[in-house]
Image (cartoon, rainbow, N blue to C red):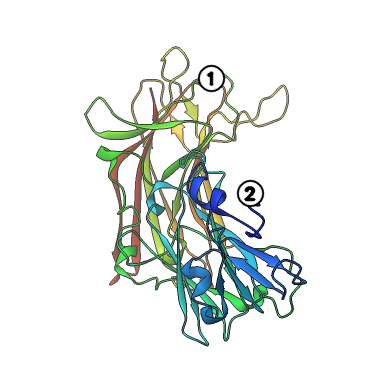
Amino acid sequence: MNNTYAEENNRISACKSINTSPDGDVRLVANEDPDGSMAGVPGFYIQNHEAITNFIDEATCQAEIGCLRFCPGICLRLGKFGISQDLTTRGYNMIITDTGSGATGTVARGSIWFDEKQNFMNAPMPFQLPAPVGKYQISFTDKNGDPAWPGYVTNVNLERAPACSNALDESQIEFVMPPSDDFRCDNLFHEDDYANGIHGWQHFFAGIEVSQDETSSYVINTTRRKKDINPACSLSRTLDASCFPGNGGRTYKLYGKIRIADALGNWVATDGTDALDPSTGFSTHASPRVSLILHGVKTWRWFVETSSDGTWTDWSVDVTLPEDTSEVWKATINIKHAVKKEFHIKVSIVVSFIQLKKTNTNFLSSSTRIGE
């Protein structure tokens, strides 16, 4: 935030920051007057936002000219964490609840200053809060107002403690996931609408776009065209991590199709292994590698063989969650490697997640194609 100091009788102003920021996303402004040198008594100058005002006694605050209010005697602390910035979390809201007072406040997922389809960045979720009466519970709703989980949540990062006493600390914050047996977990790809663009899929400097293949099926194509693609270049999909806790022992089936073409458009055969270069002893990264990662729990990885005649390689892998799967904070499908080739990764529109509770088996499908 860039504070501006205005006329002599206006002690501090944040109007320029709040009203004319480039992306219109300045929010939760709070500046401490630790010794009362500006206001006469210690306190905070705050923005009029429910995620601040709902948790303090507004009756003690006084209006300021500079788009702020001064609230004596309160003690606020800024913090933030990250959630998935993929397109499926547009319209998400963070709901903050003080379990002691019952007070609640809502913070919307803001606009993203960089490409939402890049998977190495998070959507920042800020908060500016006093110490709670009980504990702060943080939950989320989707664009329809239904309970949801924004793919994942990173660790809370609190700014340096203010000069005032009894400031908020991390032990007073907890995240509340929706239940894993909720209907939203019946299809982890329910947000997909490829005819209207990319949704949950992201990339790491590979570039992706929606197109149609030779059968007119909607697919996601990588667009980066470089002869020496770094193995870090990848396509990924963040899954709803709240759908996995408590499902230890359950088996999932992940399957798809893959093919690779070189810079001249020739189909490339790979052996489906992490082959080593005999001259260096290092991995050639020739075969595409697919991973299902339950972060902090377990990672499954496998390589896929490809053909020189352009036929799709069908692959299928069964994964069973460890019995003690009680917490999962991030879950990701990742496709990478197949370097030193120019290639597209294509993901077909046929993606679904079906629960078969009677057999305690889930089928997770992602028809994934690397091709021309």
> How far from the left and from the top, in percent, is residue 301?
53, 47
> How far from the left and from the top, in percent, is residue 363?
33, 57
**Local SS, label 1:** loop
Q: Nearer the viewer, residue 233 or 151?
A: 151
Residue 226 has which mark? 1
Q: Would residue 95 be visible to someone looking at this image?
A: yes
> Which circle's residue, 1 or 2, is located before the other in the chain?
2
- Residue 4 higher or lower than 9, as above or below: above
Mark 2, residue position: 2
> How far from the left and from the top, in percent, is residue 143?
33, 58
Q: Amino acid at mark 2?
A: Asn
Q: Would residue 155 be visible to someone looking at this image?
A: no
x 30%, y 70%: residue: 357
- Residue 4 higher or lower than 324, as above or below: above
- Residue 88 higher or lower than 359, as above or below: above
x 65%, y 30%: residue: 276
- Residue 116 higher or lower than 339, as above or below: below
Q: CA distance from mark 1 to mark 2?
A: 41 Å
x 60%, y 31%: residue: 275
Q: Amino acid at mark 1?
A: Lys
